Structures are given as structure tokens and as C-alpha cells.
Image: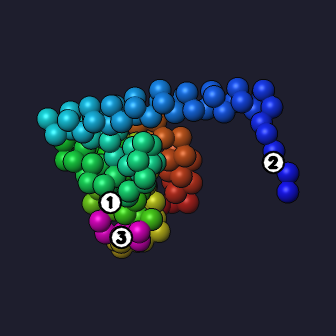
């Protein structure tokens, strides 16, 4: 069995990767620690960013339980995107009623995607009773807030007399 030795190009690549790990990983940890501190001080955006780090596994292993906790705190502090993210996780877990509540809260905070997803739950009847009129209402709000897909869905329901 012969050994494979890296050539000079491979060595440069390996050196660059290792160097970037030594530079980037501490920055990710430092940023995460700073966000956790800011979150504990009541910064909703810091809570949201901490949730993203845990959801995506940046600087740590992915941990949806911790991600949900930070997204929920972000939502409680009035950041609609945090509400939407925790709702998406709950929806994947098939906890539709809980997802509905967070989508509703996110939509209340004028988060377009939360309104869109709330409308979708009404249209599909997941976690709540099927209700096309409510779906149309929330698609319209999401459209006004800039969600283009909602505009199409609203127009479709409107054309069909709903």
C-alpha cells in the first residue's frame, strides 16, 4: 500500500482551510456569546440570531430545542421573524396548533411570511378548521406586506368567488 502525499497546491489549500478555521470559529463563538448576552438583556434581534446559530449549527451542533427557545424569546420580545421561525419548526414537527399560534403572533407583528404561512394553514385546514375566507384575509395582508406569492394566492381565491 502506498502513501499519498499532498502536493504543494494541496498543502496551500489545507493551510488556508485550517487558518480560516482558527480565525472564523472563534469569531462565531464570540458573536454567539455576545448575542446570548444581548438576548438575556432583552434584545429580540440577538435572540433571533442566536436561534439561527442553533438551528443551522453554526459554531455548534444543530439543536432545534435551543433554536426554538431563542426564537420564542425573540417572538415574545416583539420580533415577528422569530415567531415565524419557531412556527416553521413546530409545523415540521406536525404541531400545527402551536405553529398556528406563532404564525398568528408573527402576522400581528406584520411579518409577511408569517401571514402567508397562517393563510396556508387556514387553506389546508391544518391545526385549525379549513377556512378559505380567513386564508384569503391573511393572503391579502401578506401581499400588502410584500409577499408576492400571497398576492397570487389572494387573486386565485378572489377569482373563484371566495
Q: For marks 3 and 2, give the CA distance.
A: 53 Å
Q: Residue 62 appears in which quarter of the rendering?
A: bottom left
The image position of residue 66, as x and y in percent, is 30, 55
115 to 6, vertically: above or below: below
111 to 92, vertically: above or below: above
In this figure, which residue is indicated by the disc labeled 3? 95
| Mark carried by residue 65 | 1
Label 3: element kind: loop
In this figure, which residue is indicated by the disc labeled 2? 3
Magenta region, residue range: 93-98
Q: Nearer the viewer, mark 3 or mark 1?
A: 1
32 to 89, vertically: above or below: above
The image position of residue 41, as x and y in percent, is 14, 35
Taking the spot 27% from the left edge, 48% from the top edge, the residue there is: 70
113 to 128, vertically: above or below: above
Instruction: Name which of mark 3 and mark 2 comes first in the sequence.
Output: 2
Amino acid at each position: 500500500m502506498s502513501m499519498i502525499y499532498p502536493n504543494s497546491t494541496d498543502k496551500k489549500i489545507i493551510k488556508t482551510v485550517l487558518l480560516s478555521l482558527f480565525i472564523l470559529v472563534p469569531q462565531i463563538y464570540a458573536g454567539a456569546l455576545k448575542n446570548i448576552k444581548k438576548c438575556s438583556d432583552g434584545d429580540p434581534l440577538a435572540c433571533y440570531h442566536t436561534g439561527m446559530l442553533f438551528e443551522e449549527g453554526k459554531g455548534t451542533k444543530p439543536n432545534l430545542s435551543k433554536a426554538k427557545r431563542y426564537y420564542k424569546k425573540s417572538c415574545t420580545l416583539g420580533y415577528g421573524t422569530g415567531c415565524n421561525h419557531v412556527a416553521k419548526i413546530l409545523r415540521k414537527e406536525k404541531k400545527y396548533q402551536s405553529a398556528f399560534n406563532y404564525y398568528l403572533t408573527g402576522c400581528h407583528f406584520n411579518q409577511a411570511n408569517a401571514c402567508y404561512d397562517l393563510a396556508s394553514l387556514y387553506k389546508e385546514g391544518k391545526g385549525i378548521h379549513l377556512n378559505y375566507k380567513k386564508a384569503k384575509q391573511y393572503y391579502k395582508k401578506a401581499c400588502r406586506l410584500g409577499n408576492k406569492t400571497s398576492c397570487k394566492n389572494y387573486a386565485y381565491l378572489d377569482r373563484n368567488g371566495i
